[in-house]
Image: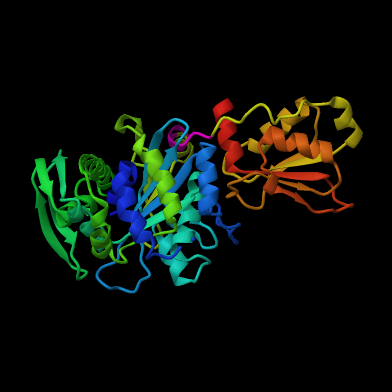
Amino acid sequence: MAAIVVGALYSGYLYFATVRALVARTHSPFAESVAQAGSEPVRASAPELAQVVEQRERVNVLLLGIDQRGDEPGPWRTDTIILVSIDPTSNSAAMLSVPRDLWVTIPAFGESRINMAHLLGDQHDYPGGGVALAKKTVWYSLGVPVDYYVRVNFTGFERLIDAIGGLTINVEKAIYDKEFPDNSYGTMTIEIPAGIQQMDGATALQYARSRHGTGDFDRMTRQQAVLLAARDKVMSLDIPLSRIPQLLELAGDSVKTDMSIEDLIKLAEIAKRIDRSRIRYGVIDGSLTTTVVTPENWMVEVPDWDRVRQLVNDLFPSPVPSAAPTPSLSASLLASEKARVVLENGTLVPGLAQRTAELLKAQGFSAVRYENADRFDHAETLLVSHADKPYTTQVLAAQLGVSPENIRSAAEPDASADMVIILGRDYAQRESQRR
């Protein structure tokens, strides 16, 4: 369902013309179980996003298709999960499709299918609701910060496809699905022949939702085909601004996002510059997961996190840090402060704290201990200072890429270490690129 919104996002013009009007009517938020969720990913405000774009930094948008039927009040699961990243530096974009049955840790709720995050967030009044918990779950699972979301239901998908006059799609394999879900919690039979097909919104929805073939994995590939068809269609249209009210009425409350008009303008400006050849696609498919039946008799996909992480790193590479902010190391200043440093591994990457401790020792730091953190879902590296060691704090933050807002002061004169560094997934990704 979210595929049409992704296509509109890439197209630039129609994305802006359609969704900016919608925004005016939307409201603007195998791993160890997590007992308590960490801090909520902070969404940039419109002025901050403008600055981000000027600085040519990557913007990540989570697209969610929910299984809402008619006027159901919810809560709903996510039928489609797609992470999109726009990179203004290279004028490129990347998209990763995530299977709804992927077995992950949902912060504050433990292990479950990833499509349950949205439902649990709404069901248990999670701060920011289901979309906030979905964003956090994707962030913690993949190690990619999520800036924004766009959420679409079945009705919104159909209306947006019809609003652009339908799609032309090359159906590589004929679809014959005798168990396609209808709108009354029953099933129906659908048939879509192979070859070039003209699809209206209802047919495109069937094509994107059907689990014909290898279930969710083939379905995600078809969603990407819908994405490309939507992008090609909107790029070929010259839609006047006078159609904005009409599109607004068509979509109604079926599309929700936390992006402002200013956000959309900036993203649209970038999207216009992105050629189709500069869009990369990935799917967490059966080659990266193992199908497992849980004690509750759920069939889930358990990820091979090493291989998933490699795919994520390929699609969403971390920016290469500038060498300028790193101060030169002074052995005498380090020796004068005699700061005792403890490294904690806050990720699922084995040996991360040990390797980092050995690296720091070789550079002259006093790394007295390395161990696992109390949680393994830290997205960003934290530096907690228990003593006044300004020089060591400065150079460690620069060496490990710790942002200023993640440097904390907690004076403890009797602490066994002067500072504790909890290594997050941001550092793990950079380390994997150096190795």
Residue projecting furthest to the right: 336
- Total label count? 0
Q: What is the quadrant of the C terminus in the image?
A: top right
For the stretch drawn in magenta, the main secondary structure is helix
Q: What is the quadrant of the N terminus in the image?
A: bottom left
> Which image quadrant is residue 205 in?
bottom left
Horizontally, residue 19 falls left or right of residue 125, namely left
Q: Position of residue 260 (x, y in %)?
A: 44, 56
- Residue shown at the point (76%, 42%) measured from the top left: 342
Horizontally, residue 348 falls left or right of residue 169, namely right
Q: Position of residue 407 (x, y in %)?
A: 72, 47
Q: Position of residue 94 (x, y in %)?
A: 39, 38
- The answer to whether residue 78 shows anywhere in this view is no
**Viewer-side residue, 128 vs 59:** 59
Image height check: is 169 above or below 276? below
Color theme of the render? rainbow
Horizontally, residue 35 falls left or right of residue 123, namely right
Q: Which residues are magenta?
A: 311-318
- Residue shown at the point (35%, 49%) measured from the top left: 99
**Viewer-side residue, 120 vs 87:** 87
Horizontally, residue 380 falls left or right of residue 83, namely right
Q: Position of residue 209 (x, y in %)?
A: 23, 54
Q: Is residue 21 magenta?
A: no
- Residue shown at the point (58%, 47%) measured from the top left: 379
Q: Is residue 314 magenta?
A: yes
- Residue shown at the point (55%, 28%) measured from the top left: 433
Image height check: is 255 above or below 429? below
**Viewer-side residue, 99 vs 206:** 206
- The answer to whether residue 165 shows anywhere in this view is yes
> Which image quadrant is residue 388 in?
top right
